[in-house]
Image (tube, helix red, strand yellow):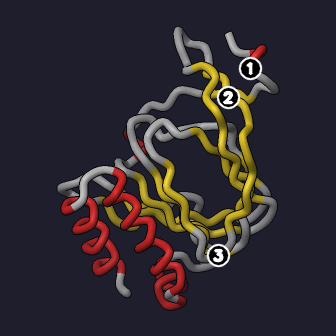
Amino acid sequence: MSLEQFAARCHEALKSRPGTEGRRQVCALVKEALQDREFVATYIPEGTPERKVLYEDPELGFTILAHGYTGARGSPPHDHGPSWAIYGQAAGETVMTDWECLARPAEGRPGKARRLRDYVMRPGDAYLYEPGVLHSPRRDGPTRLLRIEGVNMERVKRDPYEAVEDAAAAP
């Protein structure tokens, strides 16, 4: 599958089935693309930078990205603002954590989040994170991902969250 074919199929899914149903279909397309060794080798090869925009849809605004990480790296709990995101594991493993939002960011203070569960994403896995859903990836070694954002997140301001141990710590 070429990038152009993949992007066209994503566009069709999102245009014909707005909302969660179309995003679930795109998640299935990400899994399909990750099974295509030639697709992965061409668009997410070793040496891929940490963030490389492969395609940005001119009509719907979704963005297809390749990510490559060479060493250990993690991030705090976050959402994608008003957008959704699909993470697809191309190589290596990512430990993903789902978080419960205890308090949204407000008045310059970070939001509060409590860990719900951890799971390992292995090559071929893909997960959809709807708008407002908190998650955080941790990579303990080299990894490569195919990711789709509902909008290019480089142009979206996101508020920070911090992890807390329990609900008593939330304001």
Q: Residue at x 52, y 79 (%)?
A: 34
How many neighbours does mark 1 have within 10 angstroms: few (below 14), some (14-19), or many (20 or more)? some
Secondary element under disc 1, as helix, strand or loop, is helix
Q: Residue at x 77, y 61 (%)?
A: 71
First along the sequence among labels 1 and 3: 3
How many neighbours does mark 3 have within 10 angstroms: few (below 14), some (14-19), or many (20 or more)? some
* Amino acid type, callout 3: Pro
Q: Which of these two is toward me, 67 or 167? A: 167
How many neighbours does mark 2 have within 10 angstroms: few (below 14), some (14-19), or many (20 or more)? many
Q: Position of residue 18 (x, y in %)?
A: 25, 53
Q: Which residue is mark 3?
A: 123
Q: Which residue is mark 1?
A: 167
- Say whether residue 122 is left or right of residue 1: right
Q: Which residue is mark 2?
A: 113
Q: Quadrant of the N terminus?
A: bottom left
Q: Position of residue 57 (x, y in %)?
A: 26, 60
First along the sequence among labels 2 and 1: 2
Compute the Cα span from label 2 to label 1.
Answer: 9 Å
